[in-house]
Amino acid sequence: HRNASEALETVIFGLPLKAGDEVVLSKQDYPNMINAWKQREQRDGIKLVWVNLELPSEDNAYLLGQYTSAFTTKTKIVHITHVINWNGQILPVRAIADAAHSRGIEVLVDGAHSFAHFQFTIPDLGADYFGTSLHKWLSVPLGIGILYVKKDKISKIWPLLAEGDRKEDDIS
């Protein structure tokens, strides 16, 4: 993938969501991500549930609570921006992911501004899906990114480009 946005759009547009399914996201998420979810809302009738964070904040309980209070029985996925691009706020991704997973909610993490900026591993975050850009902190040429999908989630993501015989456990 060229960057985090394209990597994560693969998941956003490939998830099997239907009318009435809810996605929790924040008004502070990256604009490309917000626009992708809005397209799914218009196209498929999913419901976007917005969290509006008062930032900056050093209160992880507050940040966690903003997300968990938005979860309902219809929530299928939570979109979390690891580091918010316009102010550097680091969200408590693992705590939100654990709370989401305890309710059967999948977790998509936008790591465009965190990957290789500080110490963590992708599995440490508890994300089902993680996308990042590599040019931000690794000095890789512009336009190269990573998409991480937990192995047990691969088969549910529809590819953006049609392919021949699809192998359900093959991420390519």
Image (cartoon, grey):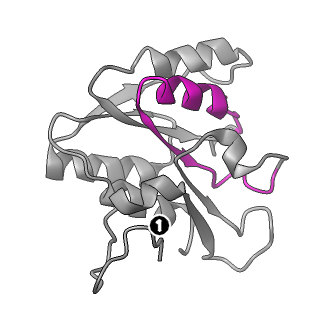
Count the marks: how many? 1
Along the horizontal axis of the image, is 6 left or right of 46?
A: right
Picture quadrant where residue 50 is located: top left
- Give the image location of residue 158, x and y in percent: 31, 65
- Give the image location of residue 22, x and y in percent: 28, 33
**Residue at the (80%, 68%) spot, across then down:** 138
**Residue at the (73%, 63%) spot, across then down:** 136
Q: Residues within 10 Å of mark 1 (few under 14, many from 20)?
A: many
At numbered mark 1, what does the secondary structure look like: helix, strand or loop? helix
Q: Amino acid at mark 1?
A: Glu
Q: Quick check: is 125 in the magenta stretch?
A: no
Q: Specify whether residue 9 is in view.
A: no
Q: Which contiguous range is marked in magenta?
A: 88-117
In the rendered view, tell whether residue 7 sits above or below residue 83.
below
Front-lying residue, 157 or 34 = 157
**Residue at the (17%, 34%) spot, across then down:** 20
User: Which residue appears farthest toward the bottom when viewing the image?
Assistant: 164
In the rendered view, tell whether residue 84 sits above or below residue 4.
above
Along the horizontal axis of the image, is 151 left or right of 169?
A: right
Q: Disc 1 designates what residue?
A: 6
- Give the image location of residue 2, x and y in percent: 55, 75
- Give the image location of residue 120, x and y in percent: 79, 46
User: Which residue appears farthest toward the right when viewing the image?
Assistant: 119
In the rendered view, tell whether residue 121 sits above or below residue 146.
above
Picture quadrant where residue 148 is located: bottom right
Q: Specify whether residue 73 is in view.
A: yes
Picture quadrant where residue 54 is located: top right
